[in-house]
Image (cartoon, helix red, strand yellow):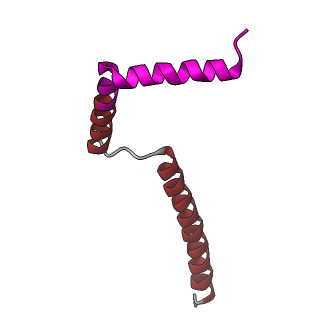
Amino acid sequence: MLSTTKLNDISIKIKEIVDSSPLGEVEKNLNALLKGVFTKMELVTREEFDVQAEVLRNTRKKLEMLEAKLAELEAQHKP
């Protein structure tokens, strides 16, 4: 059975071969192209989406609290 060190060495050598071959250049170009397309599509990361969703949840809670408080104040000042 191959040891972890041997597997790591083989993995490194394969990566070096791919990086030095035209395949490595194609991969870099493809990554750059995809990043450009995603930027133009104005996509956001999952982390950014989650942060904005949390901000929206908090804002909704505050709005509901303010609406309840306003209704209470209006009820107190009705003749």
Q: How many marks can you see? A: 0
Q: With 30 as the anchor, is 69 left or right in this view?
A: right
Residue segment shown in magenta: 1-28
Q: Is residue 3 magenta?
A: yes
Rendering coords of residue 18 (x, y %): 40, 20
Rendering coords of residue 22 (x, y %): 29, 20
Rendering coords of residue 1 (x, y %): 73, 8
Q: With 71 as the anchor, is 35 left or right in this view?
A: left
Residue in the image at 61% along x and 23% along y: 8
Q: With 40 as the anchor, is 4 left or right in this view?
A: right
From this view, report whether residue 29 is shown above or below residue 52: above
- The quarter in which the C terminus is drawn is bottom right
From this view, report whether residue 70 is shown above or below residue 50: below
In the image, farthest residue toward the top: 1
Q: Nearer the viewer, residue 57 or 41?
A: 41
From this view, report whether residue 58 is shown above or below residue 32: below
Rendering coords of residue 24 (x, y %): 35, 25
Q: Nearer the viewer, residue 18 or 39?
A: 18
Residue in the image at 55% along x and 63% along y: 60
Q: With 22 as the anchor, is 50 left or right in this view?
A: right
From this view, report whether residue 4 is shown above or below residue 78: above
Q: Nearer the viewer, residue 19 or 56?
A: 19
Q: Quarter of the image holding residue 32?
A: top left
Q: Nearer the viewer, residue 66 or 16?
A: 16
